[in-house]
Image (cartoon, rainbow, N blue to C red):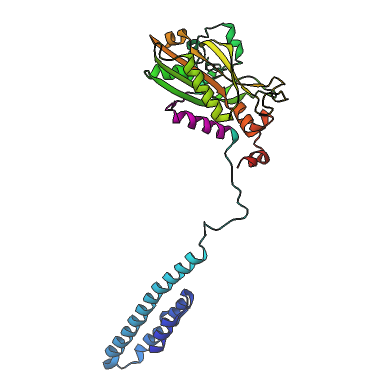
Amino acid sequence: MKEWLEKIDNAQSLEALETLRVETLGKKGVLTLEFAKMKDVPNEEKKAFAQNLNQQKAAVTEAIESKKVTLEALELNRKLEAEKIDVTMFNAEHTCGAVHPVMDTMDRIINYFQNLNFSVEEGPLVEDDFHNFEALNLPKYHPARDMQDTFYNKDFTLLRTHTSPVQIRTMLSQSTPIRMIAPGTVFRRDYDITHTPMFHQIEALVVDDADKISFANLKHVLVEFLHHMFGEVDVRFRPSFFPFTEPSAEVDISCVFCGGDGCRVCSHTGWIEILGCGIVDQNVFDAVGYENKSGYAFGLGIERVAMLTHNIGDLRSLFESDLRLLGQFK
Ligand code: PHE
């Protein structure tokens, strides 16, 4: 039996061990055959014969069981070793994405105003008439609604045409002083070289007690902001009209491409229109129940800024997901 125990101990695999089990304990195994000889053993020797065989059987069984445990552990280790994936291994085919110019620009602007302690507010993309128009001093049938080509839904909701409704939501849910920006998606029924039906805006609103906020505050914040975004450009405020601000202005910067001499990008005017702004109209404060307050607001289109800072000529290329374009902004 000793040789069998040695063979078992030397078994190199689970299959080899199984073969040894069959050869010893199987139907025609050496031990099984020994047991068969029992019938020929004289009665008085039967007991000793059986005891001896049982001991051998127990020894072999025990040896096989313990060898099995060892071999199984080895097998598991071998598998773990063979199937290991090195996730840190360099992969030459791996390509790395880049932040989309629109999101990159949005992040820069958000960062700038967060550093000035502005909070970041959000509102729903599907708005109602009150927040998108009515409360912003745009009553029903007012001709100024034509300025915005609105997508209406059947249930009288609409896709917000600007981020200004977030002004209303913030004033209705917070108290002054308010210093907020609202970045996000807006929608208009428009599609040509300079318009896409979906684009992005950032709104800003500052409100405090009466007489605390003036046009001078607005002007200072905007000039600093535009210099941060575009470098030392000239900034020009042009009187304009928005229903929710009075007085209102549109703000231009000197053309970042020709420095103001006139080129194709600025339509040979030397100036590029960049945002709309103004002092919050009293009617807007009335709509949200604010008394004795003063404030300013402005809104700008992110795509326009992204095109100027990333040197992109066609607005629509921002929405085409062409990896050759996007790959340039790593
Ligand atoms: N909501 C205006 C637009 O979409 C921009 C604006 C915001 C103007 C705030 C003035 C004040 O054109």
Tell me the residue at 44%/31% (across/down): 115
Residue 116 shows in the view: yes
Q: Relative to the observer, which residue lies in front, 218 or 191?
A: 218
Q: How many tags in the picture?
A: 0
Residue 94 image position (x, y, % from top left): 60, 51
The residues colored magenta run 102-123
Is residue 33 highlighted in magenta?
no
Q: Quadrant of the N terminus?
A: bottom left
Tell me the residue at 53%/23% (across/down): 223
Residue 322 image position (x, y, % from top left): 67, 38
Compared to 15, does 289 lie above or below? above
- By secondary structure, the bulk of the magenta-drawn segment is best described as helix
Q: Quadrant of the C terminus?
A: top right
Compared to 51, does 181 lie above or below? above
Residue 259 occupies which quadrant of the picture? Answer: top right
Compared to 316, does 148 lie above or below? above
Q: Relative to the observer, which residue lies in front, 230 or 51?
A: 230
Residue 1 shows in the view: no
Tell me the residue at 44%/82% (across/down): 10
The picture quadrant for ligand 1 comes to: top right
Compared to 35, does 264 lie above or below? above
Residue 170 image position (x, y, % from top left): 42, 20
Residue 33 image position (x, y, % from top left): 41, 86
Is residue 104 highlighted in magenta?
yes
Tell me the residue at 34%/88% (across/down): 38
Q: Relative to the observer, which residue lies in front, 127 or 246?
A: 246
